[in-house]
Amino acid sequence: METEKRNLIERYSTTIKAFSVAILTVMLLIPLAMIQSLIRERQNTRQGAVQEITSKWGGEQTVTGPCLVVPYEEIRVEDKKEITVNRNLLVLPETLDVKISTRVEKRKRGIYDASVYGSDIVLSGQFDGSVITRQNVQLSQVKWDDVRIIIGLSDLKGIKDNVSLQSNGQTTTFDPGIPVENLETGRGEAGKNANITYELFRVGLNAKMDSLNPDSALQETFPFTVSLKLNGSHGLYIVPTGKTTTAAIRSDWATPSFDGEFLPQTRDIDKAGFSAEWRVLDLNRSFGQAIRSDDSNAINQMASSRFGVRFIQAVDQYQQNMRSVKYGILIVLLTFVVVFFIELLQKKPVNPFQYILVGLALVLFYTLLLSMSELLGFNLAYLAAAVMTTLLIMFHMGSILKSRKNGFLVGTLLAFLYLFIFILIQMESYALLVGSLGLFAILAVIMYYSKKVTSSLFSF
């Protein structure tokens, strides 16, 4: 019986080893999943460091305005009694021209860095005072002493100099806050991140318009110019409050992502930076030139109409690390298949323990890649980790198989696989097509060489 049992095991030893290798391959999914969890953890740590930097420098900025706030009294009749209600009319400029120049720099926290910007913003245009009378507001009802110009901002910490208003030869300094009764803040969704919202008038600046009176309000227009030095991070946006809004943004950032409701009409991007220009008409948006301060629907529509640019990193090493790990099982499987074929074809048995060591080396590649990419960048880290892993496995398998040629064969396969995966990671639009064609070619090669081992593998 023992002889028959031993003969049975020897007869099916190749099949048993094949199933053992398959089980080992599946088991290696566990450390690969743990590495994916580690990548997410490191990514969250980086995001925390970036958040700490930007919270002190200035966050994403959305500039709204200038807007003219005209307080007035509205008389209502309720139960045969006249009731005076205080209202505020938000008058938007007839024209708004925005010129922005930004300089992007790196700020570090430990091994992590964040891209932040400093910007010089000039807002110029003109208001049409006749809009007030066209809203059925009598000039005698207006509280002229309380008329203000307001500018909505996202983060006041980003203001780096006094902000002043130039209008009709007079200069007025802005004060912090927006002291407007019943002013809706206006909420919008931050692009693709639908769970993140921003508000237009949560914080901002205000300046009293002492020069404005019934006589000047009846004039056709009165101009304004506001200069603003503003720090921020992530993105910079403009709300098209003008009946005609033009905007020009120039920066030394080479990888912009134009975002918001409107794309630029012209843009020029090169290694030195970018420039972009927008032109938005009142016909392109869904709100008018005069809005009541408590009209939440209209102010929310204002929030949804913002446009601008995001200063994104050209390469996100954590996303690339995650994509490379997803191909990990493919590299492990193909490496084991090649070693298994060499073992059968050349009659050089490999201990299952050696398969485990090779598998652990292949998994260790991804921890090397993650740790080095945080310091060296993804491309250089990938090259270093791939060379280290390939040489380690090549020399190890050459020693185990007692053949430098076979070790070199395994090393060549690994080098090809790492190169193939790197190309897939760098590609976006054609990654699926190239990956499918590459896998088809690899499968064809395996099917060709498998003919020589099929008889011994399934010889029942």
Image: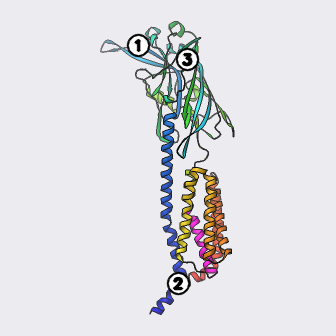
Residue that carries the numbered disc 1 in the rendered image: 73
Quadrant of the drawing holding the N terminus: bottom left
Residue type at mark 1 is: Glu
- The residue under the point 53% across, 83% down is 13
Residue that carries the numbered disc 2 in the rendered image: 12
- The residue under the point 63% across, 72% down is 446
Q: Nearer the viewer, residue 101 or 182?
A: 101
| Tag 3–tag 1 contact (CB < 8 Å) | no
> Total of numbered circles in the picture?
3
Residue that carries the numbered disc 3 in the rendered image: 165
Q: Nearer the viewer, mark 3 or mark 2?
A: 3
3 or 1: tag closer to the N-terminus: 1
3 or 2: tag closer to the N-terminus: 2
Q: Nearer the viewer, residue 216 or 388?
A: 388
Queried whether the magenta region covers residue 339, the answer comes back as yes
- Left of 413 or right of it: where is 353? left
Pinpoint residue 63: horizontal percent, then vertical percent: 54, 28
Mark 3 vs mark 1, CA separation in Å: 27 Å
Residue type at mark 2 is: Tyr
- Label for residue 142? none
Q: Is the residue 435 above or below the residue 230 in the image?
A: below
- Left of 47 or right of it: where is 168? right
Pinpoint residue 453: horizontal percent, then vertical percent: 61, 80
Disc 1 crowd rating (10 Å Cα; few below 14, some 14-19, many 20+) is: some
Residue type at mark 3 is: Leu
Secondary structure under tag 2 reads: loop
